[in-house]
């Protein structure tokens, strides 16, 4: 009955569109600083480590508040909880305009991360309420693609602004507009679908922490994000300094990974759903992506650089959305505990993005550029090894886990 209601509601496409726009806009305002580096660093007299901190501090907020955001959603509902996070982000986006103190800017940028923390934790739950299991991979793939689009737009357009204030005002207005659309159009579930039972926060946390598969997904995302943030953030500058590539061309080359990720995140999960299996699209794609990222750097610059980056992006884009569907597809979690599970996975994911590049990979590599990419390749390989521990969760699995999940409703 649940799936019939989902199929009958064409409004699910409106839900997906608004969530996609929200994800694009949040990533745009976070990574806008990267495109404004030439203005931002001298304006606030920043050291390199301070600029790196300004770039990554929203991810720290996501790591800290992911679990609380998910647990609160299981207790009070998805729309209301995500709305709170977006309110804080809207206020912060206006608050950072005109700030000329690094400490104050860092504080505003930290609270800017609340919106993504609350959205990432609960997106599987809200999409799972609207989309049947066979469409969840596709829906999550579209959502994941939003991050790549937001980052690409931020890096491509930030240099067009004449001042930091104008750039931040533009992004603040954009997030306010998306927030208004969110308030007006987002609904937590289709009409006629009964509300999920309210769960005590301690019970939800207990169920999630005892799930081996949630831990597997979360640890996998930790290694992936640590390696991905290092690789994508370091590649352009490394191509220029170590291989003498023109900075404009180097930036374009680095963006190939992001654009390929967008393609993979849309079409990879669709293929997985059509076949009815997930495992062939998890660890194998991670291993291929790991090998390709390393080859893209180590081989002499040329056409193979582009080819291997595009293959890697497609591979990672295929696997990540499938991992993000775990809160809805795991039979021991399902829609009842999906918020807490999503928050748990998001916490380790963003912890990897914040800590692994600055406190693991770069200290180990030192000034050796080749070792930076060696360690990111190892990070991607560990990501694939961890994914081997996940069971088959596709619709053609030996046991129909998707139906078991729906019974929890």
Image (tube, rainbow, N blue to C red):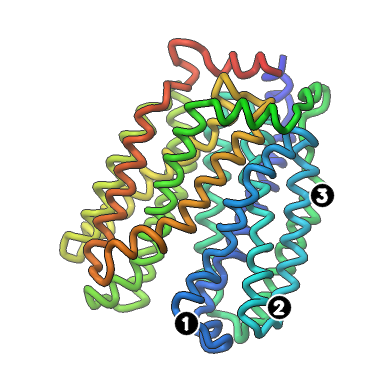
Residue, disc 1 = 47
Left-right relation of 11 to 344? right
Crowding near the residue tagged with mark 2, few <14, some 14–19, many ≥20 C-alpha atoms within 10 Å? some
Quarter of the picture containing the N terminus is top right
Crowding near the residue tagged with mark 1, few <14, some 14–19, many ≥20 C-alpha atoms within 10 Å? few
Mark number for residue 183? 3
Mark number for residue 12? none
The residue under the point 51% across, 45% down is 348
The residue under the point 69% across, 37% down is 71
Q: Earlier in the sequence, mark 1 or mark 3?
A: 1
Mark number for residue 97? 2
Of helix, strand and loop, which one carries label 3?
A: helix
The residue under the point 50% across, 79% down is 37
Q: CA distance from mark 1 to mark 3?
A: 40 Å
Question: In the displayed structure, would residue 197 be above or below residue 147?
Answer: above
Q: Quadrant of residue 74?
A: top right
Crowding near the residue tagged with mark 3, few <14, some 14–19, many ≥20 C-alpha atoms within 10 Å? few
Q: Earlier in the sequence, mark 3 or mark 2?
A: 2
- Furthest toward the left, the residue is 300
Do tag 3 and tag 2 residues touch (Cβ < 8 Å)?
Answer: no
Closer to the eye: label 1 or 3: 1
Quarter of the picture containing the C terminus is top right
The residue under the point 79% across, 27% down is 198
Q: Quadrant of residue 94?
A: bottom right
Residue 170 visible (yes or no)? yes
Q: Position of residue 30 (x, y in %)?
A: 59, 64
Q: Earlier in the sequence, mark 1 or mark 2?
A: 1
Left-right relation of 384 to 12? left
Q: Position of residue 212 (x, y in %)?
A: 48, 26
Do tag 1 and tag 3 residues touch (Cβ < 8 Å)?
Answer: no
Q: CA distance from mark 1 to mark 2?
A: 21 Å
Q: CA distance from mark 3 to mark 2?
A: 24 Å
């Amino acid at each position: 009955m649940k799936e019939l209601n989902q199929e009958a509601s064409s409004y699910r496409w409106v839900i997906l569109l608004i969530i996609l726009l929200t994800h694009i806009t949040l990533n745009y305002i976070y990574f806008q600083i990267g495109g404004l580096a030439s203005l931002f660093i001298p304006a606030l007299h920043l050291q390199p480590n301070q600029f790196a901190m300004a770039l990554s501090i929203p991810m720290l907020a996501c790591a800290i508040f992911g679990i609380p955001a998910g647990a609160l959603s299981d207790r009070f509902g998805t729309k209301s909880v995500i709305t709170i996070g977006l309110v804080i982000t809207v206020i912060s986006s206006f608050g950072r305009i005109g700030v000329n103190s690094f400490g104050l800017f860092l504080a505003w940028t930290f609270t800017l991360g609340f919106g993504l923390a609350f959205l990432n934790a609960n997106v599987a739950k809200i999409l799972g309420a609207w989309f049947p299991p066979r469409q969840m991979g596709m829906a999550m793939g579209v959502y994941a693609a939003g991050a790549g689009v937001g980052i690409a737009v931020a890096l491509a357009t930030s240099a067009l602004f004449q001042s930091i204030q104008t750039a931040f005002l533009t992004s603040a207005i954009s997030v306010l507009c998306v927030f208004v659309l969110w308030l007006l159009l987002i609904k937590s579930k289709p009409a006629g679908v009964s509300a999920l039972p309210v769960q005590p926060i301690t019970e939800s946390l207990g169920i999630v922490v005892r799930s081996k598969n949630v831990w597997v997904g979360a640890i996998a995302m930790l290694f992936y994000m640590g390696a991905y943030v290092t690789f994508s953030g370091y590649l352009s500058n490394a191509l220029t300094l170590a291989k003498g590539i023109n900075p404009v061309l180097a930036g374009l080359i680095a963006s190939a990974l992001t654009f390929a990720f967008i393609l993979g995140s849309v079409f990879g999960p669709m293929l997985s759903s059509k076949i009815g299996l997930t495992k062939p699209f998890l660890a194998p794609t991670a291993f291929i992506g790991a090998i390709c990222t390393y080859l893209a750097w180590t081989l002499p610059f040329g056409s193979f650089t582009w080819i291997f980056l595009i293959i890697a992006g497609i591979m990672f884009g295929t696997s990540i959305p499938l991992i993000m569907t775990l809160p809805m597809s795991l039979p021991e979690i399902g829609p009842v505990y999906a918020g807490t599970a999503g928050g748990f996975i998001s916490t380790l994911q963003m912890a990897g993005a914040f800590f692994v590049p600055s406190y693991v990979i770069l200290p180990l590599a030192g000034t050796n550029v080749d070792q930076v990419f060696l360690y990111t390749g190892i990070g991607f390989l560990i990501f694939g090894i961890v994914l081997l521990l996940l069971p088959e969760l596709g619709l053609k699995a030996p046991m129909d886990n998707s139906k078991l999940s729906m019974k929890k409703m």
